[in-house]
Image (cartoon, rainbow, N blue to C red):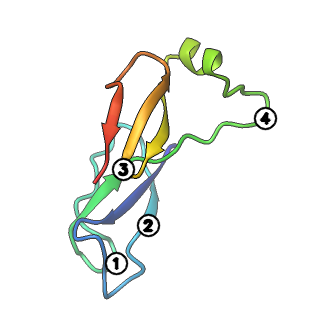
Amino acid sequence: MPLYDYAPSSGHCDQCPGRFEVMQRIADDKLTHCPRCQQACERQVSRVALGGKYSTSEAAVKSSGFTRYQKAENGVYERTAGTGGPEILYRD
């Protein structure tokens, strides 16, 4: 089962640590509220952890159907491998 990261929609929480992880099935609905404080929350995009026998080279990423982005500058990420998604991502 995948592990999903969640964070408060407002960006912080005064009642609990804020960010939390939940093990959920892929078919399960996203959580909308923190289980501790009931504040609205959002599921976060997390980095995929690959290691051991898995190669993270650009060719391996592309042949596996994934897309890799690399930070170009503050808040700007450029696609370096794969064909999915936009060429450039902007993050606030």
Q: CA distance from mark 1 to mark 2?
A: 10 Å
Task: Determine whether, in the image, residue 55 is placed left or right of residue 48.
Answer: right
Instruction: Identify residue type, mark 4.
Output: Gly
Q: Nearer the viewer, mark 1 or mark 3?
A: 3
Circle 4 residue: 52
Q: Quadrant of residue 34?
A: bottom left
Instruction: Identify residue type, mark 2.
Output: Phe
Of residues 5 and 30, which is closer to you in this image?
Answer: 5
Q: CA distance from mark 1 to mark 3?
A: 31 Å
Q: CA distance from mark 3 to mark 4?
A: 30 Å
Question: Label 4 near label 2: C-beta < 8 Å?
Answer: no
Question: Label 2 near label 1: C-beta < 8 Å?
Answer: yes
Task: Determine whether, in the image, residue 9 is placed left or right of residue 61.
Answer: left
Placement of the C terminus among the 4 image quadrants: bottom left
Q: Earlier in the sequence, mark 4 or mark 1?
A: 1
Element under label 2? strand
- Name the spot of residue 48 as percent of width and height, x first: 55, 40
Element under label 1? loop
Circle 1 residue: 36
Instruction: Identify residue type, mark 3.
Output: Gly
Circle 2 residue: 20
- Name the spot of residue 76 as percent of width and height, x first: 37, 43
Circle 3 residue: 75
